[in-house]
Image (tube, rainbow, N blue to C red):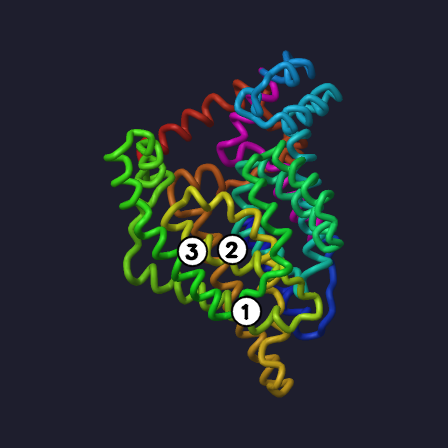
């Protein structure tokens, strides 16, 4: 319920801005969102692995262990992430507080950048929550969230055309999640103009490529066993293209692609806050998000593009500026209602689409509220044992 109360508050503020051109309560709302998503308690599933690492591995780890190891990873984690965990552990913070601080700082960086770059940043906030932050924060997908925040810090260097500084910050981000290396491409986005025709070619070409990719990989795996592991990614239901969507579902997805691209080409293109690299990130996100339903493996990469998408679809004030004020206001309200209706349905689906999601997302708990109520578990074993067993049972039965 708390997620939908939040969506209602964001909708009201979005509507208020579009009608009166005034922004209010930005700090209050931002703090509320950060508090809700940073300090959740026993939500998601990834926290089990993170907390086990924090409480069982970090206490016995020395800095020399990291540097003596020739591998990029340490117990499966990037070394930058390990160092940050060592820092918080040595300060005496428990897992919940340390992870909460890391999520809160990351969210502040993301939201602060969004406030500066978006016209109606309430729409951007909701877009970020629905398409990324809901799962990234509640699970949490902690390493990639930190990497996302560092990438966003690097955008100042991108705008100032400081290539070496930009590369350095992206390099730092890879020490939290190596997938951030893809963000080196963003530096060149400012010089690329993606118009409607190019976008259509990009979308259709990517779709055709992913349609034939499983066939090509399967043929190659028959020739050489080196390709066998890639067939697992492509045909496994968890990672690959085993998701077959019906004609209706695909049609709805295509309509949404057209709608999102319309918002960018007809809205953000005429915004005084427009940045070309953010526009291109938004357009590429639309393609990746669509294709991610066919190949979920690539969905994780979309997180780095989401900020551009969230910012570039928020400029609905610029749609059809030649209309009369009355007709323009009616159109903006209609578009706003449509956006929030679609996004709220997507959020509802994330929370209630399966018994597993209902178990790990629907019953929101906050660390500080549980602390005040005296409902915190005594230790990690007590906290995780039954919870993990229930999660495993739900996964097996699904």
Q: Quadrant of the C terminus?
A: top left
In the rendering, at what x and y percent does residue 391 appear?
A: 41, 30
Queried whether the magenta region covers residue 51, the answer comes back as yes
Give the residue at mark 2.
285
Q: Nearer the viewer's eye, disc 1 or disc 2?
A: 2
The region drawn magenta spans 29-56
Give the residue at mark 3.
290
Q: Residue at x 52, y 43 (%)?
A: 135
Q: Residue at x 52, y 18 (%)?
A: 381
Gap in angstroms between the C-alphas marked 1 and 3: 16 Å
Q: Earlier in the sequence, mark 1 or mark 2?
A: 1
Q: Secondary structure at mark 3?
A: helix
Tell me if mark 2 has few (under 14), some (14-19) or many (20+) residues whose alpha carbon lies within 10 angstroms of its own.
many
Gap in angstroms between the C-alphas marked 2 and 3: 8 Å
Residue ranking furthest to the bottom: 324
- The label number, if any, that marks residue 263 in the structure image: 1
Q: Earlier in the sequence, mark 2 or mark 3?
A: 2
Q: Residue at x 32, y 47 (%)?
A: 243
Q: Secondary structure at mark 2?
A: helix
Compared with 44, 384 (above or below) is above
């Amino acid at each position: 319920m708390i997620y939908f109360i939040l969506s209602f508050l964001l909708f009201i503020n979005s509507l208020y801005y579009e009608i009166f051109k005034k922004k209010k309560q930005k700090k209050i709302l931002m703090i509320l969102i950060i508090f809700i998503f940073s300090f959740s308690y026993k939500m998601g599933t990834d926290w089990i692995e993170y907390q086990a690492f924090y409480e069982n591995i970090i206490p016995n780890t020395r800095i020399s262990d990291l540097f003596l190891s020739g591998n990029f990873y340490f117990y499966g984690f990037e070394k930058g992430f390990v160092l940050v965990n060592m820092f918080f552990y040595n300060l005496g913070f428990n897992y919940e507080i340390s992870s909460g601080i890391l999520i809160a700082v990351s969210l502040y960086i993301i939201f602060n950048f969004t406030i500066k770059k978006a016209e109606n940043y309430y729409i951007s906030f909701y877009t970020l929550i629905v398409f990324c932050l809901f799962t990234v924060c509640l699970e949490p997908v902690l390493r990639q969230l930190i990497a996302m925040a560092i990438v966003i810090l690097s955008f100042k260097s991108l705008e100032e055309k400081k290539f070496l500084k930009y590369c350095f910050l992206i390099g730092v981000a890879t020490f939290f999640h190596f997938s951030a290396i893809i963000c080196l491409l963003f530096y060149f986005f400012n010089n690329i103009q993606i118009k409607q025709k190019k976008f259509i070619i990009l979308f259709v070409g990517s779709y055709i490529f992913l349609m034939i990719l499983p066939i090509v990989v399967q043929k190659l795996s028959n020739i050489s066993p080196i390709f066998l592991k890639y067939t697992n990614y492509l045909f496994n239901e968890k990672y690959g293209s085993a998701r077959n969507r019906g004609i209706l579902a695909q049609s709805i997805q295509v309509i949404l692609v057209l709608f999102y691209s319309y918002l960018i080409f007809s809205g953000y293109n005429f915004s005084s806050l427009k940045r070309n690299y953010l526009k291109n990130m938004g357009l590429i996100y639309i393609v990746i998000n669509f294709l991610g339903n066919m190949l979920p493996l690539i969905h994780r990469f979309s997180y780095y593009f989401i900020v551009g998408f969230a910012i570039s679809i928020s400029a609905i004030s610029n749609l059809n500026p030649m209309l009369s004020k009355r007709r323009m206001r009616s159109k903006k309200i209609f578009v706003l209602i449509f956006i929030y209706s679609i996004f709220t349905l997507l959020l509802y689906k994330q929370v209630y689409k399966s018994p597993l999601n209902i178990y790990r997302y629907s019953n929101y708990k906050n660390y500080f509220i549980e602390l005040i109520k005296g409902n915190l578990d005594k230790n990690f074993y007590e906290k995780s044992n039954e919870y993990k067993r229930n999660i495993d049972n739900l996964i097996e039965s699904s």
